[in-house]
Image (spheres, coloured by chain):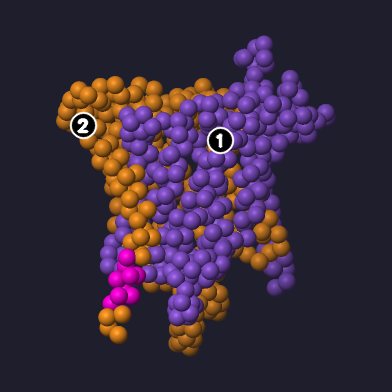
Chain colours: A orange, B purple
Amino acid sequence: MTKSRFNFRTKEAITFYILISPFIVMLFLMKLFPFIWGVIMSFTNYTGFNYDNLKNIGFDNYERVVTDNFAIQSLQATAVIGLITVPMGLLLSFGLALLLNSNKKGVGLFRTIYYFPSIIPVVATGLMWRILFNNDGGAFNELLGLFGIAPVNWLGMEWCRRALIIFMAWSAGGGILTYLAALKGVSNDLYESASIDGANGLQKLLKITIPILTPVIFFNLVNGLIAAWQLFAEPIFLAANAGSLLAVPYEPNYVYLVHVYQQIFVNQRFGYGLSMIWLLFIFSIVCTRLVFYTSKFWVFYENETGSERVKKNKKKTAARQKEVSSVA
Amino acid sequence: MLRKKSFESLLWYSTAVVLAIIFLVPLYFTFINALNGLASTPVLTLPKKLHPENFVEAIIRIPFWRYLKSSVIIVSISVFFAVWINFILGYAFARMNAPGKDIWFSILISLMMVPAFATSIPTYVLFSKMQITDSYLIWILNGIGGSPFYTFLFRQFMQTIPKELEEAARIDGSTTVGIMFRIILPLTIPVVAVVFMFEFLNSWGDFVQPFMFLNEERWPLSTALMGVRYTLPNNASVVLVPLQLAASLLFMIPSVIVYFAGQKYIKEGMITSGLKG
């Protein structure tokens, strides 16, 4: 009996490893190998043709990044845009989800409309916005004209960052679904007992909804940060000379990854481009780590927001509510 | 009390409608200007004379079918692997026990935090060094490796399926493969639908990877549309805005269809999966 049990376990373990073997193989082949190779190459003067006589140049590439004005400026641009778009995305998604967390008639239609921009490929929305923002022949300037406002050069040096922010705000609803899922999971009992205790809407929002939703806010914040560092598509589409992946946006929208693409695809400075990539990677990881570190101060895991856990806890919560209200 | 209720209702609807208008305005402008005459100035209301033929023009003026073929190949490969590989991985992580499982799972989860550029760009440099360019191999290899997020969705969902079902089948002599496909799969359809939908949207819209790994003749619609400029045949500086807009609307259609078809599964497939962070 023990023997057959042992056999079953071994068999199960073998099956498990057979099933996940594609993942393991590709982890080494397509993730770790290019990664390590890329790190090694970042310490060389590799430019595509000189593979046979590569020189180890130590940290030269990295030093060059730090002294490369375009790299530093583009990093600043990325950070500033991220500082605007990440909170904006969080607030917009959260606000829209709050609005949509209702039983009113037609709520499904509104959900579809708000989420719609997030499902359209950025190629389509990028083309669309570029044309709408166009200086002559753009619908936005026509619209402004109705109000007597002179046409704005949206894609020009002065306005292009604002245009980018508008574009990104429009498609910032991607987090709606996760917030809504979490909101649906919040037990109604909590709100009811809070109402009995005389809490108003704002108090309920601050004391119940937001704390319970902190894990989702955290999830979206981390995703937003990771996405912010690798911002690339939107600025490219709004670039004045758009029409290729290698378009060069004006300075305010010249983000870090655009500079990297210029190095790698235009100039074939592979070693240099890769060292830029690793610096961004470190930035991104450090940033995510920091947020993870702060999470223990503001993310509440004891009240898991999932409908499952809430259902399990519902009885418990109800009992606790009774206790609380009886004390009150 | 009733008054307060109806006031609240009014407030809700007016907010919702105003927001909906803001979200729809760009799409509305796109739509009506796509129907505009080629030489006309942009319009803010439906043009007097509609030009639905712009949509046909947008197709026949570019090698549309060649681009579409490549899109179809990329989407098919991506979706096929995304569904099957992650289904299998999800099953292994949700339902099986083996030494080292937790370590592999935490590696998988931490891969979610790795930005895409950190592997795609070195892979591009590596592939161009090995001269494996202009092939769909990269989509196959990446597909085989699975996607952590999809695996996670499958695993979370499968964990909610009662163990007894599986044990009963095992006693009846089912193999692991039999259990996976005959018992687990039918119950996991919502996640299959969600993964299908996400990966479709993702691969249909991806323009960066094809740009890196394929030559221009094999570019899919996404990458090609980026560079397409509809201009007057005798004057390349005159951009035909209605055609550009028509093309971008045409490009949205498959995404929209897939989203509407898959929408009803999102609730079950994602929410039950416990995607709360």
Q: Residue at x 48, y 56 (%)?
A: B84
Q: Where residue B69 sits: x, y (%)?
A: 59, 35
Q: Nearer the viewer, residue A57 or B59?
A: B59
Distance in Å between CA atoms under marks 2 and 1:
37 Å
Q: Residue at x 54, y 59 (%)?
A: B192
Q: Nearer the viewer, mark 2 or mark 1?
A: 1
Question: What amino acid is at disc 1?
Answer: Ser
Identify the residue under disc 2.
Answer: A43
Residue lying farthest to the top in this orientation:
B234
Please give the label number shown on residue B70: 1
Q: Where residue A3 sits: x, y (%)?
A: 27, 80
Q: Circle 2 sits in a helix, a strand or a loop, which is it?
A: loop
Q: Circle 1 sits in a helix, a strand or a loop, which is it?
A: helix
The part of the chain drawn in magenta is: A5-14
Please give the label number shown on residue B26: none
Q: Residue at x 33, y 53 (%)?
A: A24
Q: Is residue B132 left or right of residue A235?
A: left
Q: Where residue B94 sits: x, y (%)?
A: 41, 67
Q: How packed is label 2: few (under 14 Cα within 10 Å), some, or many (20 or more)?
A: many
Circle 1 chain: B
